[in-house]
Amino acid sequence: MKVYIFLAIMILCIILVPVTAYLLKEWYAYWSHALLAIIFSVLAVLMKTSYYWEED
Amino acid sequence: MAPPIPEATPELVAGVIAAVVAFLTVSVLLGFLMRKKAKNFEEWLVGHGDIGPFITGFALIASYLSGWAIFGNAGLGYAYGWAGSWLIGTMCIMGMALCLVIGYRMRRYVGLGARTVPEMLRVRFESRVVQALAGLAMIVLLIVYSVGQYKAMATVWTITTNTSFYWSLMATAILVLVYIAIGGYTGTQWVSCFQGIVLTIVGWTLGIVALNWAGGPTNITEVMRTESFTVPGGNATQIPLSDYTLSLPPPEGLTFPGLDWIGVTAAIFMFLFMATGFPHNVARFLGTRKITKREYWVMLLILIVGGLTPLWIGAVGFAARAVWGNALMAGKYQPMYGDSAATFVSISAGGVPLASLFAAGVFAASVATLAGMVMIMATNITRDLIHNMRPTVSSTKLLWLTRFMLIPFIAIPLWWTFTSPPPILSEFMAGSAVAQAGIFFFVVGVSMYWKRATKWGAIATIIYGLVLTVLHPNAYGKQIGLYHWGYWALLLMFGSAFIYFFVSLGTKPLSEEKLRKLFPKQNTS
């Protein structure tokens, strides 16, 4: 269940990129994209290490 | 009062040459040191499979940050204002994280005999045709990418040494040859790691210094609200630079990704797919050792720090626009135009030390990348085409042929840049990036996880991707009414996805027995 929540948040991060550009504009939008990308990447690695970890 | 646009001085020339020579020396020493440790050419390519997270992380940064990110992003910010952000890649860390999560499985194919990405595809699909086609696609797309690297280094050389742009192009070609001749092309993880650290330091330093130099973020915002788009050559328009979309007039304006929200959507997907789609990126994992969960987080931290570098360089472009207005778009700066912004800011804001450091950074990003790409293209011919089709050809002949093939692969993009240099290099390179994203994200990235992928799916995707590449709005797309970059990019990426899955599902995959070797049962924890 948690995996789907993580996935939903990751998709939301992508959707929010153009939305923040439209609503926030200028520097706020610029750095908010970086923040959204960091949240996305933390969740991606969290999913990998928690649920899809591969042993050799 | 705004500081003047700087000119080259003897101190600057000396500083830049010293920085480039120092960078070259360290890269070559590292290359030789690691080469000495390797017993043969294959070990030299991927090491002993013992590379840790720190080296892999920064090597990934180095292969991702090319002349586009470390240099061209300032040109985007300068020429297009906030709408340039879509090609600056403000959310590029998302794509890099996907590459980190997906690319790690490349290690599995080293154990099965693969040393390059096309070889990994031969192993995955048991098909020499897929290997050859992938090699061919890489050649076509890397030639386009190489043009941007030439422009980046030639622009820095022109501005800092006061040499003409065309002689600077020749100097860049000579630097590439020197770099390759003395062994700096190795592209070993250690050299790449060093380059990744240099690029990160340069990007962060220049970005922070530039913001301060331009009077701070608030001042930049206020000035940008008054700026309007200027066509390369100097014709100012009434189109404001204050928004995240820029309604440039058709038909030429339709080729700009930040034109509307369709183009923006395409640019977002391009950045999501392209880090994994760049074959030279996923190849970084070929030499990686087994990584613990904690080390995975270390790699992510490195990617986040390094992945913010393109944003800092983009900010340099905004700073230059706020200080010098549209002056750099004038005919006087042809063919560099806005792409010259970062170099001028490095000189004006930081003097000889920062300008020299920046030149070393661009050298790392463009000349080293160019040398690596030239080597990859030459190897694509010898290893993925000739040796693939005629395995009996001796290794001595292949080595000599590889050396011979360096000449055309240095000369073709040089001639291209010489005869028609792109006004904004990142915009030009994005064409190749979309194709690499659309083709290789699926053919390489997804195929490592999806058992049902077939060689016919891979072949059809590569062919479709290459055909669509030729139909870029600035190439032959206009002849069939494809003027809009966003539609073209979405058609390429999602068309590739559709063809990959559709053809794969309609054709026969490898046998269960063979697939078991590629997808052994895992204990997940």
Image: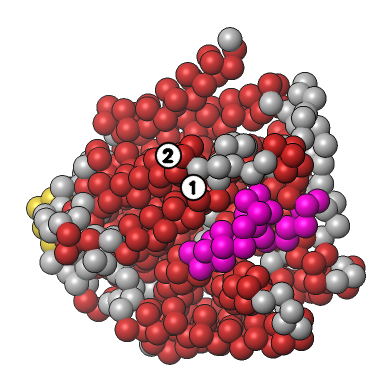
Chain letter for mark 1, please.
Answer: B
**What residue sits right under mark 1 in the picture?**
B457
Q: Nearer the viewer, residue B290 or B444?
A: B444
Report x, y in % for residue B287. 77, 54
Of the two numbered discs 1 and 2 on the same chain, state the one appearing first in sequence: 1
Residue range highlighted in magenta:
B110-138
The structure residue drawn at horizontal position 74% and vertical position 79%, both measured from the top left corner, is B392
Q: Say which amino acid is labelled 1.
A: Gly
Chain letter for mark 2, please.
Answer: B
Q: Nearer the viewer, residue B11 or B317?
A: B317
Q: Main secondary structure of the magenta part?
A: helix
Q: Say which amino acid is labelled 2.
A: Phe
Report x, y in % for residue B288. 77, 49
Sort mark 1 into few (<14), some (14-19) or many (20+) by Cα contacts within 10 Å: many
**What residue sits right under mark 2 in the picture?**
B502
The structure residue drawn at horizontal position 24% and vertical position 66%, both measured from the top left corner, is B476
Q: Nearer the viewer, residue B509 or B472?
A: B509
The structure residue drawn at horizontal position 17% and vertical position 69%, both measured from the top left corner, is B234
Callout 1–callout 2 Cβ contact below 8 Å? yes
